[in-house]
Image: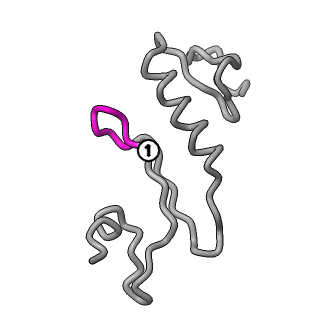
């Protein structure tokens, strides 16, 4: 009936289809990633998995964050004023 699509804002009332949506929600129910694509643009399951892995790492790490294109085992960052303008 489109209820889930409507709740995530991906339902297109004009044609009755849902845009391609990917959502990552943490164990506390907090939305961490939301991407909505037109029907003509595919999604990357590898990129979605990478974001889930980054979310898990950040949740368990002590204040560290994952930079763009981070992969498990790669270098992470500790946010601070010394990084402003250098990334």
Q: How is the image coloured?
A: one colour
Kindly indicate the quadrant of the structure image that contains residue 25.
Answer: top left
**Numbered circles on residues, count:** 1
Residue 20 drawn above or below residue 63? below
Q: Position of residue 87 (x, y in %)?
A: 71, 28
Q: Residue at x 55, y 29 (%)?
A: 54
Residue on which the image places disc 1: 24
Q: Position of residue 68 (x, y in %)?
A: 67, 34
| 47 sits left or right of 2 in the view | right
Kindly indicate the quadrant of the structure image that contains residue 50.
Answer: top right
* Magenta stretch, residue numbers: 25-31
Disc 1 is placed on an element classified as strand
Q: Is residue 54 magenta?
A: no
Q: Position of residue 20 (x, y in %)?
A: 51, 66
Kindly indicate the quadrant of the structure image that contains residue 46.
Answer: top right
Q: Residue at x 44, y 16 (%)?
A: 60
Q: Position of residue 28 (x, y in %)?
A: 28, 32
Q: Residue at x 36, y 35 (%)?
A: 26
Residue 46 drawn above or below residue 84? below
């Amino acid at each position: 009936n489109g209820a889930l699509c409507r709740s995530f804002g991906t339902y297109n009332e004009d044609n009755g289809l849902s845009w391609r949506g990917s959502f990552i929600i943490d164990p506390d129910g907090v939305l961490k990633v939301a991407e909505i694509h037109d029907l003509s643009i595919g999604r990357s399951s590898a990129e979605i998995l990478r974001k889930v892995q980054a979310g898990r790492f950040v949740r368990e790490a002590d204040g560290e964050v994952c930079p763009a294109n981070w992969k498990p085992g790669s270098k992470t960052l500790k946010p601070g004023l010394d990084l402003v303008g250098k990334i």
